[in-house]
Image (tube, helix red, strand yellow):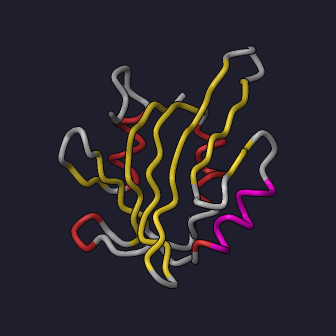
Amino acid sequence: MLTFHASIYGGPPEHARPLPVTFDQTIAALQQFERLFIEPDGSLVWTGSTQDGELWQVDGNLIDRGDALAYVELKGRCPQDQFDRLLTAFGWPQATLAFNLPERGATLSEADFRRLAASEPGAV
């Protein structure tokens, strides 16, 4: 299970930039997910449970900037395979993503973020 509070940008951590998808493309992709509710303003909540019955939830906001999706704010916990699925709506795995941890003031690569998010305290 991954635990996190992060802002997700496009590009490597040292050159974070808007994501390679538009706001509308992202909303359309996320509307296909079961148990994911998204408002027209980009706020979302996605819930589920593991095969063992453990409940999880991710809350977030899509932040639009003109014709680009500037970044996505996500907070919660979910299994790694569901997190992977969520990232596909933001252009992953074709696009490199940067993960900013606002409470720590750090921006991490995907590999570093995943390591931290999988740890006991998580990436919060």
Closer-to-camera residue (13/38): 38
Instruction: Locate the C terminus by quadrant.
Output: top left
In the depicted structure, whether residue 61 falls above or below residue 67 = above
In the depicted structure, whether residue 101 falls above or below residue 70 = above
Give the overall secondary structure of the magenta segment: helix
In percent of width and height, residue 109 lies at: 33, 56
In the depicted structure, whether residue 41 falls above or below residue 94 = above
Q: Is residue 39 left or right of residue 43?
A: right
Q: Is residue 25 magenta?
A: yes
Instruction: Locate the N terminus by quadrant.
Output: top right
Q: Which residues fall within the magenta stretch?
A: 24-32
Residue at horizontal 39 percent and vertical 39 percent from the top: 5
In percent of width and height, residue 62 lies at: 52, 60
Q: Is residue 23 magenta?
A: no
Q: Is residue 33 left or right of residue 24?
A: right
Residue at horizontal 68 percent and vertical 64 percent from the top: 27
